[in-house]
Amino acid sequence: MRVPIIAGNWKMNKTVAESVEFVKKIREQLPPANQLETALAGPTLSLVSMREAADGSPLKIAAENCYYKNEGAYTGETSPYALYQAGIHHVILGHSERRKYFHETDEIINKKIKAALTDHLCPIVCCDDTMGRRTAGKKVHWVVNQILSDAKGLSSDEIRHVTIAYEPSWAIGTGQSADPDEAEEGCYLIRQTIAYMYGKEVAGDVRVLYGGSVTTSNINALMASRDIDGVLVGGASLDPETFLRLVNH
């Protein structure tokens, strides 16, 4: 059985104090971890304080990114080994904003996934289709190529520890969410791609999420979809009361 997960991605928002206060407000009102995994990805500066505030609760703290080296002359980057040693559980990799603004390629993301797994982090790997390809009638099929490239060289055991998030770029931060059928189609294609690469049994173990303008209005329909194992939430995760309504949907 795949335990569903709802993860918030704060992006470059909140101070350390604001992050800690948020965790304190929600930590006692989360579902049991064996029913739903709850995670929050905050700015690197806040992660240790967030983890300390979350201790003893079901909440997992995630990083929004990491590098593919553990140490060295890489000014401004974050070591996956240092994240693990700080008690961080997950790391988001390949977000469309990283691909668009920081020019991350599938080759770089593939290296980051392997480094995160080596250092015992659970990667949440994002993949998307673009509005251009969608309006051209090709819908979500581009996601297949990204999965083939991002997961290249991973073993069956390794891919089982990867969570994949389908985030159509046209839906992120726009208020325009994919409808449940579109979201299901993207997640289904991801699972079929994993089955093609590793077999149906492995594909049945991999969690696939939807992300892109998730709200309290569409959370129930998304979570009821067969191939959607949870959601990666952006703007709606910034308010504690809204986030609690999402995780207690």
Image (spheres, rainbow, N blue to C red):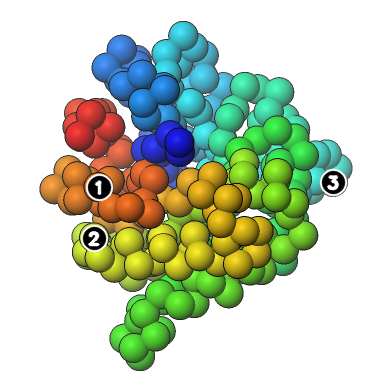
Badge 2 vs badge 1, beta-carbon distance below 8 Å: yes
- What amino acid is labelled 1 in the image? Ala
Q: Does residue 21 lie above or below 152 as drawn? A: above
**What quarter of the picture does the C terminus occupy?**
top left
> Mark 2 belongs to which amino acid?
Pro
Residue at which label 2 appears: 180
Query: Which residue is depicted at the point 55% across and 66% down?
Result: 193
Residue 100 in the image, given as x and y percentages of width and height: 52, 68
Quadrant of residue 121 in the image?
top right
Q: Residue furthest bottom?
A: 136
**Which residue of the protein is positioned furthest toward the left in this rendering?**
217
Residue 171 visible somewhere in the drawing: no
The residue that disc 1 covers is 224
- For the residues labelled 2 and 3, the Cα–Cα distance comes to 45 Å
Q: Nearer the viewer, mark 2 or mark 1?
A: 1
Camera-side residue of 227 and 168: 227
Q: Which mark is residue 9?
A: none
Q: In the visual, does 15 lie left or right of 74? A: left
Q: Residue at x 70, y 45 (%)?
A: 158
Q: Which mark is residue 73?
A: 3
3 vs 1, front mark: 1
Secondary structure, mark 2, is helix
What distance separates the C-alpha of mark 3 from that of mark 1? 46 Å
Callout 3 crowding tier (Cα within 10 Å): few <14, some 14–19, many ≥20 = few
